[in-house]
Amino acid sequence: MNAYWLEQSDADVPAENHWLSAGEILSLGRMRYPKRRNDWRLGRWTAKRALAACLNLPRDLLALANVEIRAAASGAPEVFLFNQTAPVTISLSHRAGIAMCAVAHPGTGIGCDLEVIEPRSNAFIADYLTAREQALVAQTLDEERALLVNLLWSAKESALKALHVGLRLDTNCMDVSFNNGLPPHADQSQQDLPFVPMGDVDTDGWRTLHVRYFGEQVFCGWWRHANQMVRTFVSALPLYVHFRALKSPTLDSNLESWTDGDTVEIPR
Ligand SMILES: CC(C)(COP(=O)(O)OP(=O)(O)OC[C@H]1O[C@@H](n2cnc3c(N)ncnc32)[C@H](O)[C@@H]1OP(=O)(O)O)[C@@H](O)C(=O)NCCC(=O)NCCS
């Protein structure tokens, strides 16, 4: 299977709203706080741009209004095309004027998350990380600690999104492990990790990780550090995954068929 990701910033979002559906404009009107409105618009914009590329939809602003991202009861984003459920699953995150959208086939169970690399307190580490993760942090050099702690937190949030529960679940039921790359000074055993072929992870610096949920279900995933932010993506399916960037602004030219030969019917 393939999964795709796209990031957009506040500066990419059109000032006007005619790329939003009628339902989305109503939802926006109910939001009282400017920050929430901005984040929500940025997330919707990023999702619509990613979906237009993945589903080969027209890219003009009016056509994007036919794509609607609604919140399920859990808060998880669901995609509708022309008011019908779209054959696709997405995950969204927005932070500090940047949004990320990950796109995959329906039923895949994916989650993505963006975090600013910022200092986190000892209380945060004690409250939200497992004992094994705390040991990993303790072994890490000071200058790498903020990256590691935010990365661990982000991977947990991605997995909580993939489960469609969010922070209703205790983050201590998620345990994050790395296959390579970080932290360079930690002595972490890889023996108990499942073999998950990760496919041709793209060249944008993504590295692999695993999130073990309650010691049973294992999410395979990736993380990437750039521009003072860390991003994570996880998938519940331990399949051979192609995880590719949707390169903006060359969305129109740089995309392979995301369906990989599968038929995706798009209602008109
Ligand atoms: C999901 C959650 C962990 C994300 O928190 P966050 O790191 O602050 O925010 P992010 O920008 O990374 O992600 C937000 C996006 O996650 C998605 N999301 C929200 N709830 C989700 C869920 N249960 N499952 C999957 N995705 C979810 C939404 O697309 C949301 O963006 P949107 O509301 O603009 O559509 C958090 O919102 C949460 O735990 N929500 C569920 C608990 C809840 O409902 N609390 C009450 C809030 S008032």
Image (cartoon, rainbow, N blue to C red):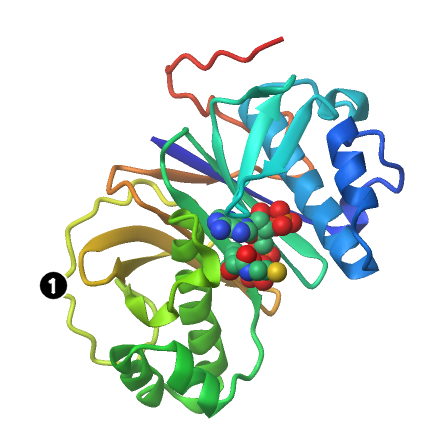
Give the quadrant of the N terminus. top left
**Left or right of 187 in this view: 113:** right
Q: Residue at x 40, y 48 (%)?
A: 162
Please state the horizontal and vertical placement of residue 38, each as a whole percent of the image.
Answer: 78, 53
Tell me where residue 223 sits by quadrant: bottom left
Please state the horizontal and vertical placement of residue 173, each as a whole percent of the image.
Answer: 30, 67
Q: Nearer the viewer, residue 186 or 21?
A: 21
Q: Which residue is mark 1?
A: 192
| Residue kind at label 1, given as amino acid type | Asp
Tell me where residue 32 sits by quadrant: bottom right
Using a 10 Å C-alpha cutoff, classify the residue at mark 1 as few (fewer than 14 neighbours), some (14 to 19) or many (20 or more).
few
Residue 10 in sight from this viewpoint: yes
Determine whether the residue tagged by mark 1 lies in a helix, strand or loop: loop
Q: Is residue 115 above or below residue 142?
A: above
Ligand 1's image quarter is bottom right
Q: Is residue 189 above or below residue 59?
A: below
- Farthest residue toward the top? 268
Please state the horizontal and vertical placement of residue 252, each as a whole percent of the image.
Answer: 64, 25
Q: Is residue 40 above or below residue 226?
A: above
- Farthest residue toward the right? 16
